Image (spheres, coloured by chain):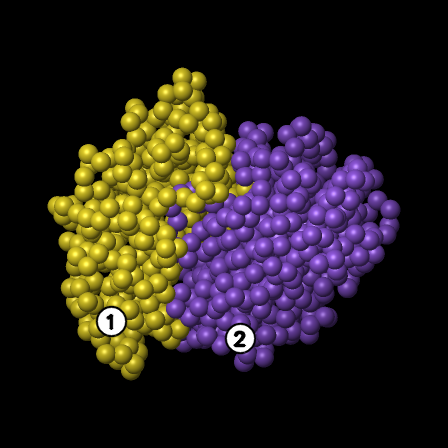
Amino acid sequence: MAEDLLQQLISRLQRVLDKQYILTMKEQLTPFECDGLSVYRELPLVAVLPGKASEVQAIIKICHELSIPLVTRGAGTGLSAGALPHPEGVLLVLSRLSKIHDINNTTLTAKVEPGVRNLAISEAAFEHGLFYAPDPSSQIACSIGGNVAENAGGVHCLKYGLTVHNVLQLKGFTMSGEAITVGATGLDTTGFNFLSLIIGSEGMLMVVTEITVKLLPLPQHVEVLLASFTALDAAGQAVSNIIAAGVIPAGLEMMDNNAICAAEDFAHAGYPRDAAAILLIEIDGSAINVEEQLAIIQKVLNESGVDSLKIARDKQEQALFWKGRKSAFPAVGRLSPDYYCMDGTIPRKSLSEVLTYISALSVDYGFPVANVFHAGDGNLHPLILFDANIAGQLEQVEAMGARILEKCIAVGGTITGEHGVGLEKIRQMPLQFTDTEIIQFHAVKEALDPDNLLNPGKNIPLLKRCQEYRALSQNLQPNKLLSHDGLAHQTPGNQA
Amino acid sequence: MSNSAQDLQEQIAEAFSEKQPVSIQGGGSKHFYGCPVAAPLLDTTSHTGIIAHEPTELTITVRCGTTLAELDQHLEKHGQVLACEPPDYSGKATVGGMIAAGLAGPARPYLASVQDTVLGCTLLNGKGERLGFGGKVMKNVAGYDISRLIVGSLGCLGLILDVTLKVIPRTLAESSFAFSVAKEQSAAFVNELRKNGLPVTASCFLDEQLVIRFAAGNKEIENLTIELEKHYSFIQHSLFVDDGFWLKLRNHQLPFFSPDDQRSLWRLSVSADTDIKPLLDTQAQVLTEWGGVLHWMKTDKSPEEIFNTMSSVAGQASLFRTSNAQDGNTTPRFQPLPSALKLWHKQLKAAFDPAGILNPGKMYPGL
């Protein structure tokens, strides 16, 4: 960027924001160089930390007038490099917009600023007997603004839905700095359903400064079950059998042996270290309802060949069972200097096929994999263990990850269930979408951000790169790899 | 691609090349909804059938022309339902129409909206290009969420060829009760029931009574009367239970909705804590659903007055059925849009339908 434009930017920012909230020095900017996916790093030109919506609007207008890219960042816990700064742009950090404006006991909603932590909403709602349902594993740290940008999920999605099912209204600004409201607290919205379009748009269509979320009454009664299996298949089948029996558990999670052992060493949750797989099942509702569900689930699990079944004795043990699962990522992280977390989602019936494929890849590439799985909704989180300090390992892991995602598409799934495309999965987008579909995505982007200033270069690949990405994938992957009858034996060194 | 899909695609491609608008219609059951479109009919009813149903995945993929009646019947065999309870208007409404209108039924605040039910779709845009978005799995955040964006777009962004929907298990039992509660208290009352763990799935305030539907497992419903008697005074109104009250409400077939009424029927939606009383015409008749959020009103008031009133409370009004069909083309049906949002509508429309041929004017003039 030309020096005079940078000076102009900074002096205009200084007119709308206190100097201490405008960061330009390398040492100030370094903490913002990446999100939760630290393999991608970039310094922005400037980072700004506004404290109120009017300051956000003023910053957007300045960037718009000077045609400077703007990347919005929440707590920085994202896992797809969606908040990776633009080297020629402004990083808009919304963590200071952290007020809970209102918990409304009549409308059962919370009106909050984007920097509010996910868990803080449920904590504030607790005294009213309410909670906010979507609960990503990072909920202690992640912000609701980031949840909206990524359409974050969590362990309770099957019953309670994703962010898109639990947000009623967004207020904020278009890239030209105009105030805009999408959605409505009155549920009906006339006009196009922009609310759903904005949620999960990875900060590419507007900047959100106020979010109204739906709150739910806290369940009267909760039971958490820990079921272990001697075979992964049986555990997968048990999940389908539970759903076939007409029960939708509040949470239904699966972990494989590697993940079980890592989590057990870390959290001492009482997981059986010799199990091939465990299921964590949470059911909630009224006491009678839970009793009915529990009876059905116990029967189904027994018929599905469960090896052992524990029902948490009290709230402490319930929390302990969950602690193992919720700390699975850091626990696996202890096993190896780095891990790479995938986020493909598949029809549950393909679970065994996909896991077999992943273990074959693991052997082939020489990287261990621990599998954590939102089993109820088919969202897989294979964690590939590696060491980024060893030259070439990151590239090999990315190639292996790409093949897992391609497999997810091949069985009718998607490359990302809840983490977003960001920069990380942009090369797999052309495998899931045709050129015509990609062009339509770009047309949507252009309709709402004609100058392509909001988080440019993420989420949707440039059309001219799509053929290249598809060709690359073809080269990497002979057709027979898509079948589940085994892998071609290529050494990692052969991978591009 | 099926013949019917190809046929629809060719029709739109031709309309695009000739810049000839089309009026997309499924079963025609909601023909009164939105402004009439003066253009040749593009009939989707031949594009029918269930493409895939995976009961244990809780998903079903179905073509647009399939009737909701057929879909419900199919799901019932597997003990499943659509959570959003869309009106099926005596079996005429189609799946495509449900998505295009985005109208959910009594369960909306407690279970799901139409967009909550959608997982993926195949569309024909205004150039006749066939596009797939979303997917057939519960979670999918790849690309923009076009499949939910399309819900309620009244065919102005594309023709919905097929959709993948999330289904839920049918509850084993349900029971309804009528309570003597003041209208102003009804939202708080419903909330209290829910906080007490009672499985509320619908509420309706009509004729000075608050009628509430509960649905859950057999034991829970059997026990419901005992639970309710512990805390509340209520009247059990067998009429509501036996006479298909909720189905009639869902299909707008209660006497309140009678098309013989000469007044216009409005659909007003506000935040549940909005005191709606001062906003209403004293002569107006009102039926309230969704725990005080959705108010159906019959009135002769002018659209302008109603829109202004709703705008003052950040609410939304739509003229669901106009008393004067002659008004058709000129009476605005939907809450006017603020300027920034209006611009987004215009630009988004152009992104999907550059020639402006899909249901032009159905939602707003010029759109």
Of the chain colours in the picture, the one used for chain B is: yellow
Residue B179 % position (x, y): 23, 72
Using the image, tell me which numbered label, if any, was put on residue B309.
none
Label 1 vs label 2, nearer the camera = 1
Q: Nearer the viewer, residue A83 or A247?
A: A83
- The quarter of the picture where the N terminus of chain B appears is top left
**Foreground of the two, A132 or A230:** A132
Type of the residue with mark 1:
Ala
| Location of mark 1 (residue) | B182
Q: Residue A265, image x and y in percent?
A: 73, 70
Q: Residue at x 77, y 43 (%)?
A: A6
Q: State the residue lying farthest toward the bottom.
A: B230
Badge 2: few (under 14), some or many (20 or more) residues near its Cα, within 10 Å? some
What residue is rendered at 55% in x and 76% in y?
A312
Total residue callouts: 2
Which residue reaches farthest front?
A15
The subunit letter for the residue under badge 2 reads: A
The answer to which quarter of the image holds residue A232 is bottom right
- The image's mark for residue A311 is 2
Q: Position of residue B12 (x, y in %)?
A: 40, 24
Query: How many residues crowd mark 1 within 10 Å: few (<14), some (14–19), many (20+)?
Result: few
Chain represented in purple:
A
Q: Give the CA separation, mark 1 to mark 2.
A: 44 Å
Q: Are marks 1 and 2 on the same chain?
A: no
Tell which of A248 and A456 is nearer to you. A456
In the shown orientation, is residue A102 left or right of residue B287?
right
- Of residue B103 and residue A425, the one placed in the foreground of this image is B103
Residue at (17% x, 57% y) in the render: B283
The answer to whether B324 is drawn above or below residue B195 in the figure is: above
